[in-house]
Image (tube, helix red, strand yellow):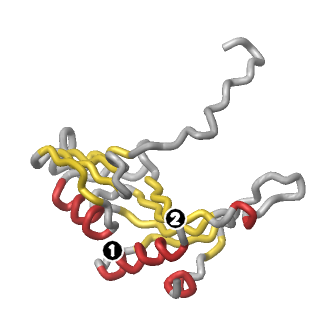
């Protein structure tokens, strides 16, 4: 790249397509992503890999034990995935997902209102961070005096969310 050259911007239609996770136990991971979060199994490769989706897509989540069967979660203080984020289309759908987590006794690590979104934080059975969230309508996003986004982290009214 030439000095002072501006990098090209990604096209506005670019999206993150899927996440592929190394897991210790495929059945345990499927019990979480399929049975609790509700993703549909689209393809499976024996006891080594599975692909799941929402809405008929080929896969949003890949799970495999190719390098991790029986392995421990990565230790704190190391690099790697901070969390995967699952975007729900509505606040009511996020509330439904939270109800399923509660029913399955999955511990929650946090909940926040970020101004642009509302989010729930937890860990999957392999210790991977998971964020479940919905985006507020763009016209409700907070902005600073210069028109830039002014995201924040405030406590989420959990009781109000569950009333959805």
Is residue 74 at all visible to an observer of this figure? Answer: no
Is residue 9 at all visible to an observer of this figure? Answer: yes
- Residue 134, compared with residue 74, is above or below; it is below
Q: Quadrant of residue 32?
A: bottom left
Q: Is 130 left or right of 36, judged from the image as shown? A: right
Q: Quadrant of residue 5?
A: top right
Total marks shown come to 2
Identify the disc placed on residue 89.
2
Residue that numbered label 1 is attached to: 106
Of mark 1 and mark 2, the one earlier in the sequence is 2
List x then y, in percent, for residue 98: 42, 76
**Dot 2 lies on which element?**
loop
Residue at the image position 16 percent from the left and 59 percent from the top: 27
Residue at the image position 75 percent from the left and 63 percent from the top: 139
- Residue 92, compared with residue 26, is above or below; it is below
| Of the pair 139 and 8, the residue shown nearer to us | 139
| Of the pair 97 and 58, the residue shown nearer to us | 58
Identify the disc placed on residue 144.
none
**Dot 1 lies on which element?**
loop
Circle 1/circle 2 CB separation < 8 Å? no
């Amino acid at each position: 790249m030439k000095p002072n050259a501006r990098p090209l911007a990604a096209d506005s239609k670019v999206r993150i397509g899927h996440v592929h996770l190394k897991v210790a136990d495929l059945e345990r991971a499927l019990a979480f992503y399929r049975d609790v979060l509700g993703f549909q199994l689209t393809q499976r490769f024996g006891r080594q890999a599975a692909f799941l989706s929402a809405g008929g897509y080929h896969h949003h989540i890949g799970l495999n034990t190719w390098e991790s069967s029986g392995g421990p979660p990565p230790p704190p203080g190391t690099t790697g995935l901070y969390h995967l984020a699952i975007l729900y289309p509505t606040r009511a759908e996020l509330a439904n997902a939270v109800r399923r987590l509660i029913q399955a006794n999955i511990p929650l690590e946090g909940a926040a209102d970020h101004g642009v979104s509302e989010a729930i934080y937890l860990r999957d059975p392999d210790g991977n961070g998971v964020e479940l969230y919905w985006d507020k309508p763009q016209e409700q996003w907070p902005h600073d005096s210069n028109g830039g986004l002014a995201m924040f982290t405030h406590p989420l009214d959990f009781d109000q969310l569950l009333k959805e």
